[in-house]
Image: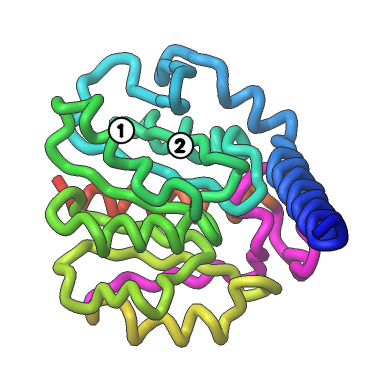
Amino acid sequence: MRKAWRIVLVIASLITVLAAGFVIWGETPAQPMPEALTALQSDAQVTVTAGPWLEFAPAISQPTTGFIIYPGGRVDYRAYAPAAHQIAAQGYLVVIVRMPLNLAVFNPDAASGVIRANPQIQHWAIGGHSLGGAMAANFAKNNPGAIQGLALWAAYPADSDDLTASGLEVLSISGTLDGLSTVEKIEASRALLPANTTWVAIDGGDHAQFGWYGDQAGDNPASISRSDQQAQIVSATVEMLKNLE
């Protein structure tokens, strides 16, 4: 009996150590670059509010279209502040959601709270980078009618989240040098998205430059600047949002 208890205690200890290690791993995300922290400041065009999520609102107009961003896996959510700030400056409410353990897979329904808190928004789009994009697609699949648009930044839906008949306005942006969400993976996702999906391939873009958090293991070096890649991401996303109005 004592031997059985020792085995149980050893197993329990191993589980505890593994769980603690996972939590530590999840709570040590890629950190935002200085440009991202600067974008957290309000200015004459955009009011930034920090609360349960980061909210970027036009300072001189009342937006009727909103865009919810799910961060990439183990990336600090603040790393997407520059893009959010720039999109908001063009007249849209933009919200970046903070995920448990910095992994969107643990709260794919996070957008529901954002939508409930902003009843003044008439049109919603959701999007995200990498794992965040996959979970945004999952939200779109599981909440038909809640949103009208989906923006996939170096991302694609899971095989179980077929959106071909969703009626959504879908945008897929990818980088031709992405070492993680590769050209082949993006191409394969066509079978899961509506026929009228807009496809934008950023020539020379990589995976990490979809945010402002430095380089990423497994990625390829980009041949264009982060600012250039970001400008193309923002431009394409704003065009998708315009189509919802």
Q: Quadrant of residue 121?
A: top left
For the point 41% across and 67% down, which residue is it? Answer: 172
Q: Earlier in the sequence, mark 2 or mark 1?
A: 2
For the point 29% across and 31% down, which residue is it? Answer: 91
- Disc 1 packing (10 Å; few <14; some 14–19; many ≥20): some
Left or right of residue 74, residue 50 in this image: left
For the point 33% across and 49% down, which residue is it? Answer: 126
Q: In terms of secondary structure, what is the magenta stretch mainly?
A: loop
Q: Is residue 59 visible?
A: yes
Q: Position of residue 174 (x, y in %)?
A: 52, 68
Boundaries of the magenta span: 196-225
Q: Is residue 30 visible?
A: no
Tags 2 and 1 touching, CB below 8 Å? yes
Question: In the rendered structure, does residue 220 fall within the stretch colored magenta?
Answer: yes
The quadrant of the image that shows the C terminus is: top left
Left or right of residue 211, residue 146 in this image: left
For the point 45% across and 63% down, which residue is it? Answer: 134
The quadrant of the image that shows the N terminus is: bottom right
Amino acid type of the residue that numbered disc 1 sits on in the rendered structure? Val
Q: Quadrant of residue 149?
A: bottom left
Q: Which of the two residues, 137 or 234, is positioned nearer the viewer here?
A: 137
Secondary element under disc 1, as helix, strand or loop, is helix
Residue with the mark numbered 2: 97
Q: Position of residue 26 (x, y in %)?
A: 69, 45
- Asked if residue 13 is positioned above or below residue 41 in the image, the reply reads below
Q: Which of the two residues, 231 or 6, is positioned nearer the viewer here?
A: 6
- Disc 2 packing (10 Å; few <14; some 14–19; many ≥20): many
Instruction: Kindly report the distance in space between the C-alpha atoms of the residues bearing marks 2 and 1.
Output: 8 Å
The disc at residue 114 is 1
Amino acid type of the residue that numbered disc 2 sits on in the rendered structure? Val
Q: How many numbered marks appear?
A: 2
